[in-house]
Amino acid sequence: MRQWTVDAFAAAPFRGNPACVVEPFDRWPDDDWMQALAKENNQAETAFLLRTADPARFGLRWFTPGREVDLCGHATLASAHALMTELGADAGALTFDTRSGPLVVRPAGDGYEMDFPADPPRLTGPVPGLAEALGVEPVEVWAGRYLVAVLADAETVRTLRPDIPALAALQGEAGEAGEVIVCAGADAGDDVDVIDRFFAPGCGVDEDPATGSAHCILGPLYADRLGRPTVRFRQVFPGRGGDLETEVRGDRILLRGRAVTVIESRLRLAP
């Protein structure tokens, strides 16, 4: 059984966010087996695919080293890339049936475009312990699936050194515990609109290099702020990071990015 490690939201190897994608199954393995393999891979996500009668439609599940998650952008992008590039899936679009409903991915230029549910955040008041955990006072705090802390400037985002155990203990009012986005408008000389980072110790990932689900929240926030549907983001994970573009379309959001296969491996076990 083959497995690929794909750098998602990346134009070159060793950037973006790595995800492991396992060759599609004819039936789902046991959950414990999938969780054990995800822990062995020790990437932010391992993606598991299920064949269907339609060659352009697959079941898709995502596991971090610690648990199964409801939505993962970079591992969906990696899955589409592996199917199209490594396994020769010949389709104008691929549909993935997931815990978050059907997700569609299609080629777009030299990358891919993913159709995801938008998650417009709500402006909220101060969150107890957030400023202390970040080490800075947010200018604003928003709440979607994750908490969003808008900081004063891009340099503050880039140099932030939060207290990870303290972040892990935070509970967002609208979503999951220990998962916080920090963001700010990009500097004038940058070729993107927004700089951001995502900390997720609540699901076993201290900091994620490039996060599609976070931009389902940031896309609507900054589309409204900038007065246009399309926004360019750079997630500035130290030494790595990734580039994403979002376009809001009603209650959906298009996420655009590139992907690169860096490893092909063969598993010496079966579920």
Image: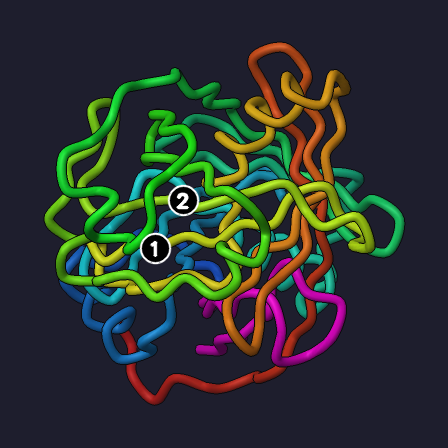
Residue pictured at 68% horizontal, 79% vertical: 13
Reply above or below: 115 against 78: above
Instruction: Report which residue position mark 2 lands on.
Output: 181
The magenta stretch is 1-22
Q: Position of residue 116 (x, y in %)?
A: 55, 30
Instruction: Report which residue position mark 1 lands on.
Output: 199
Label 1 CA crowd tier, 10 Å (few <14, some 14–19, many 20+): many
Please give left or right for residue 95 compared with residue 52 in the image: right
Q: Is residue 181 magenta?
A: no
Q: Is residue 14 magenta?
A: yes
- What kind of element bears circle 2? strand
Q: Position of residue 204 (x, y in %)?
A: 22, 62
Residue pictured at 20% horizontal, 24% vertical: 173
Q: Nearer the viewer, residue 18 or 87?
A: 18
Residue found at the very far top of the displayed protein: 250
- What kind of element bears circle 1? strand
Please give left or right for residue 247 compared with residue 58 in the image: right
Q: Hey, what amino acid is under mark 1?
A: Phe
Please give left or right for residue 152 compared with residue 107 in the image: left
Residue found at the very far right of the displayed protein: 109
Residue pictured at 42% horizontal, 58% vertical: 47
The answer to whether any part of residue 75 appears in the image is no
Label 2 CA crowd tier, 10 Å (few <14, some 14–19, many 20+): many
CB-based contact (under 8 Å), mark 1 and mark 2: yes
Q: Position of residue 106 (x, y in %)?
A: 74, 41
Q: CA distance from mark 1 to mark 2?
A: 6 Å
Q: Nearer the viewer, residue 116 or 139?
A: 139
